[in-house]
């Protein structure tokens, strides 16, 4: 469970949320109330927050998620929630002096849209790369290799991976696997730090199901699947699982004969060639010119 903090969010009125997400606001005159952050667990609520609870909250005495209670909602208000999103049946749990409530159900996709909006749509500005495959260790290696490669091309780079997440040179202290809100929060932090590109490990160690809802990915690289058609099918399945929208602009790539040859010619270590080849294929899919790629490979060759 996580939150989108005020430092990276945009101010949003309840009237806007009612109109754009199909909620019913009570009281109806609270349209100009403004929320400045968003949280899906009580402990993360700060003054100005929109509280969007999950189906249950983890308690200190029971690690299982328990149904929300009246006391939970009272605590959320005491912590500073300015408003809540609740399903209609939870009306009976409201305290005697409630904050404004947006009544309605949020499916995973709509929750992702809302989280992205509150976080100021960071993936619309960043160049977003995702790496997936059949082996988590290979994915972590590929994320690292691509980050190094893009950095050598002069790009400020961030990585989101259970192996290690960094925003430029700063290590990010994250709780894995990330949920939808945490994903939008970390993208906003990376953008605020000055990152131009973010590389996400699309695996179970790093992400919860649906965590990438509303994250616009430019290039998805996949290794460990034998044929191009199977790669496309595998990536489509991973995108459905993690909620990653595949648009007409999303490029899905695997290693190619050309990228393998270029990686071999770089004189890289044998155990690095596979990962470097996928990196080259992803760089070309992102529109990076071959001359620029060859320049980086030339530097790599000289370093070895």
Image (cartoon, helix red, strand yellow):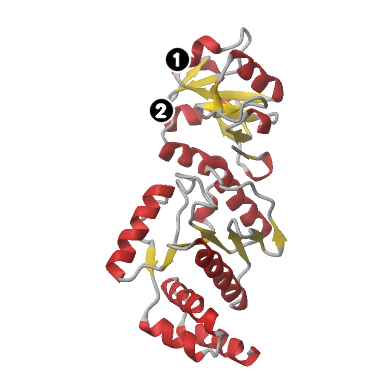
Q: Secondary structure at mark 2?
A: loop
Q: Secondary structure at mark 1?
A: helix
Asked if residue 16 is positioned above or below residue 161 in the image, the reply reads above
Q: What is the quadrant of the C terminus in the image?
A: bottom right
Provide residue 224's location: percent of width, then percent of height.
40, 68
Provide residue 144's location: percent of width, then percent of height.
58, 69
Residue displayed at 71% across by 65% down: 169
Provide residue 217's location: percent of width, then percent of height.
45, 58
Residue displayed at 59% across by 29% down: 50
Residue displayed at 61% across by 78% down: 152
Q: Which one is nearer the viewer's eye here, 164 or 94?
A: 164
48 relative position to 251: left or right: right
Quadrant in which residue 259 is drawn: bottom left
Q: Which residue is mark 1?
A: 89
Dot 2: within a 10 Å radius of its alpha carbon, few (fewer than 14), some, or many (20 or more) residues? some
Asked if residue 63 is positioned above or below residue 27 in the image, the reply reads below
Q: Mark 2 or 1 closer to N-term?
A: 2
Q: Distance of mark 2 from mark 1, alpha carbons? A: 17 Å
Asked if residue 14 is positioned above or below residue 170 in the image, the reply reads above
Provide residue 150's location: percent of width, then percent of height.
57, 73
70 relative position to 285: left or right: right
158 relative position to 285: left or right: right
Q: Which residue is mark 2?
A: 22
Residue displayed at 51% across by 83% down: 293
Of tags 2 and 1, the one toward the viewer is: 1
Quadrant in which residue 236 is drawn: bottom left
Q: Residue furthest top?
A: 96
Disc marking residue 267? none
254 relative position to 91: left or right: left
């Amino acid at each position: 469970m996580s939150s989108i903090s005020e430092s990276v969010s945009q101010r949003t009125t309840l009237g806007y949320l009612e109109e754009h997400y199909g909620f019913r606001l009570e009281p109806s005159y609270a349209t100009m109330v403004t929320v400045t952050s968003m949280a899906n667990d009580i402990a993360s609520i700060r003054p100005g927050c929109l509280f969007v609870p999950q189906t249950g909250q983890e308690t200190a005495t029971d690690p299982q998620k328990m149904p929300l209670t009246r006391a939970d909602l009272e605590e959320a208000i005491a912590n500073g929630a300015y408003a809540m999103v609740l399903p209609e049946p939870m009306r009976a749990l409201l305290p005697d002096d409630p904050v404004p409530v947006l009544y309605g159900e949020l499916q995973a996709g709509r929750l992702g849209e809302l989280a992205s909006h509150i976080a100021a749509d960071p993936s619309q500005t960043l160049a977003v790369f995702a790496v997936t495959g059949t082996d988590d260790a290979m994915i972590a290696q590929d994320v690292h290799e691509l980050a190094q490669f893009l950095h050598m091309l002069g790009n400020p780079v961030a990585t989101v991976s259970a192996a290690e997440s960094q925003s430029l040179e700063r290590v990010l202290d994250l709780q894995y696997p990330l949920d939808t809100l945490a994903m939008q929060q970390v993208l906003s932090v990376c953008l605020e730090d000055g990152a131009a590109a973010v590389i996400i490990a699309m695996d179970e160690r790093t992400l919860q199901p649906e965590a990438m809802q509303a994250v616009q990915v430019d290039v998805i690289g996949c290794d460990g699947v034998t044929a191009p058609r199977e790669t496309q099918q595998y990536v489509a399945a991973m995108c459905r699982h993690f909620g990653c929208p595949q648009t007409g602009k999303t490029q899905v790539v695997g290693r190619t004969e050309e990228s393998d040859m270029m990686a071999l010619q770089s004189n890289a270590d044998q155990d690095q060639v596979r990962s470097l080849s996928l990196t080259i294929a992803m760089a070309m899919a992102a529109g990076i010119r071959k001359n620029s790629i060859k320049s980086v490979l030339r530097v790599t060759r000289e370093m070895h």
